[in-house]
Amino acid sequence: MPGAAATGTRHFLIGTELSREELDALLARALELKAAPLCSDALAGASVALIFEKPSTRTRLSFEAGIHELGGHPIVLRAGELQLARGESLRDTALVLSRQVAAVGVRTGPDEMLAELAAHSSIPVFNMLTALHHPCQALADLLTVREALGRLDGVRLAYVGDGTNVARSLALLGVLAGMEIAIASPPGYALAEDLEPSGEGSLTLHTDPREAVRGADVLYTDVWVSMGDEHAARERRAALAPYRIDEPLLDAAAPGAFALHCLPAHPGEEISEEVLYGARQRIWDQAENRRHAQKALLELLLPPRE
Ligand code: CP
């Protein structure tokens, strides 16, 4: 059937499309690309569409800059710029994208939208953030931990706060990489208890942030009021107030523990200003690592053409 999804096309929708070996290799490659950012022309002559139905700073910057560094051409399409906004179907959009570009990234709300686009695409589709998943963020998170500690296997990472898409992707990819992931959230804000990541690591859910960070090498948090949660901002801030990453919480973790945050941050809410801009964090490395990790992902999704 002309334009139907090609067998063998690789998508990256939730992150666990990767095997443990592929994830390890991707992170090793990302470190090579970080050391020599212009060493690859894997996307020479290729265009990559980036569809943003929600705002972005890091994801847009890192994909646009990264695609350029790989010799490719990023085409950014914002909400309302595609005929999708006027009712054209996802199927027809996928068929046309597949005839024009080498891959497409999407930031949207419903995961079902991404899945339907992928089902009709003969080019790789990758997730730049959906309601449930943010796997590109998790790649950069793991890269930052590996860069700092030299390994992921057995590393304990404690996430404190809202059980967001970032927490879910971190759990899925962290366990795949062999990490011990502990997530502390208040009642009503936890990740689904039936989330069962597969891999050699482990996932434990807690309500007490101090219990979760005990022995942790890395502490991680995300905003208390995510995109789309603004209507419940007051009650979210009240429920999540005990889940702030600050110096006392870092002191309760393993010696040398450092903080991560996917950003954007709200200093004074989920993280103290002292930690965000201090010496006990790798947050700004983590933001930079989005580009290196995603370049390695694009190399994996788009093998050399004949
Ligand atoms: N962490 C993250 O995805 O940042 P942006 O929303 O700015 O892209």
Image: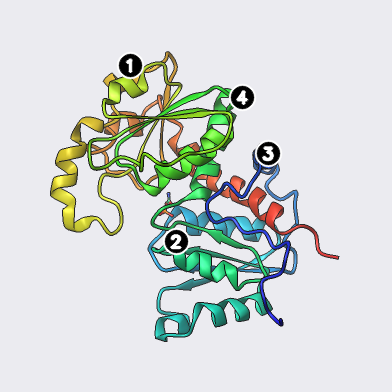
Q: Is residue 149 above or below residue 144?
A: above
Of discs 3 and 1, which sits in the foreground?
A: 1
Q: Position of residue 77 (x, y in %)?
A: 49, 73
Of discs 4 and 3, which sits in the foreground?
A: 4
* Residue that lies at the very extreme toward the top in this rendered image: 255
What residue is shown with label 1? 251
Q: Position of residue 273 (x, y in %)?
A: 28, 34
State the mark number for residue 150: 4
Residue at 46% x, 68% y is 113
In which image quadrant can residue 255 be found? top left
Specify whether 15 is left or right of 193. right
- Is disc 1 surrounded by few (<14), some (14 to 19) or many (20+) residues within 10 Å? few
Q: Secondary structure at mark 3?
A: helix
State the mark number for residue 35: 3
CB contact under 8 Å: marks 4 and 1: no
Q: Amino acid at mark 1?
A: Asp
Q: Position of residue 285 (x, y in %)?
A: 50, 37
The span from disc 4 to disc 1 (Cα, nearest Å) is 22 Å
In which image quadrant can residue 124 be found? bottom right
Mark nearer the N terminus (3 vs 1): 3
The C terminus: image quadrant: bottom right
